Amino acid sequence: MIPNDEHDYVSARVPGIDLTPFESMSTDRELLATYWRHQYDRLDQIENQRIQFTNIVVAASVVAIALLFDRDDAAKSLALRGALATVLGVNLVACGYVLRMRQHAHQTLIRARTALRVLAPELMQLNMVSGIPRNLFHSSIAYQISLHALLGGVAALGVFIV
């Protein structure tokens, strides 16, 4: 489930799941707090994995494109096309990976905010008032996808030019 606006994070309730028993919890608050911290740790790991994967793919693509276009050997044009097609394919896979990680991040964030709503409703209200703008979270993902699309486009163009 991907929320449509920033208030969906706050009010998101999973259909068919009643949170009433959790909202009346008083003895397991430490367990709930641990769960909440764990969700934000997972969110941090997801974001770091997404950024590291993009960095590796972008660096390898730029180096590969630079080295491949540097060659003047016409006899190796078939190998060059294959290498450029590989760069294109890797960047397409990277776009899919970034989008999939976005879904995992949203699910994790919803779980964390649901736990926060039960654990500390006052802090949840603070999140509603001073939450992070939606565009801030999505802009890094848009930049990553645009970068992969650009490198894939350069590779695709190179396949047809060579």
Image: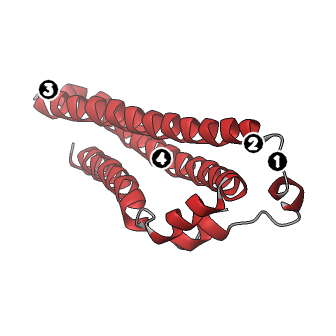
Helix, strand or loop status at disc 3: loop
Question: Which of the two discs, 4 and 1, labels the residue nearer the N terminus?
Answer: 1
- Helix, strand or loop under label 4: helix
Residue 84, percent across and down?
A: 31, 37
Labels 3 and 2 touching (C-beta < 8 A) = no
Which SS class for mark 2?
helix
Q: CA distance from mark 2 to mark 4?
A: 34 Å
Q: Are marks 4 and 1 in contact (CB under 8 Å)?
A: no
Percent x, y of residue 36: 64, 43
| Amino acid type, callout 1 | Ser
Q: Amino acid at mark 4?
A: Val
Tell me, for residue 1, which label it has, or none.
none
In the image, what residue type sits under mark 2? Arg
Which of the numbered marks, if any, corresponds to residue 29? 2
Kindly state the secondary structure of the residue where label 1 is placed: loop
In this figure, which residue is indicated by the disc labeled 1? Answer: 26
Horizontally, residue 83 falls left or right of residue 34, namely left
- Badge 3 is on which residue? 73
Q: Could you tell me how far apart the alpha carbons at marks 1 and 2 are, in whole angstroms? A: 6 Å
Task: State which mark lies toward you, 4 or 1.
Answer: 1
- Check the image and report above or below for 3 versus 75: below
Residue at figure coordinates x 47%, y 33% from the top left = 49
Earlier along the polypeptide chain: callout 3 or callout 2? 2
Any mark on residue 98, and which?
4
Q: Earlier in the sequence, mark 3 or mark 1?
A: 1
90 with respect to 109 (left or right)? left
Q: 29 or 81: nearer the eye?
A: 29
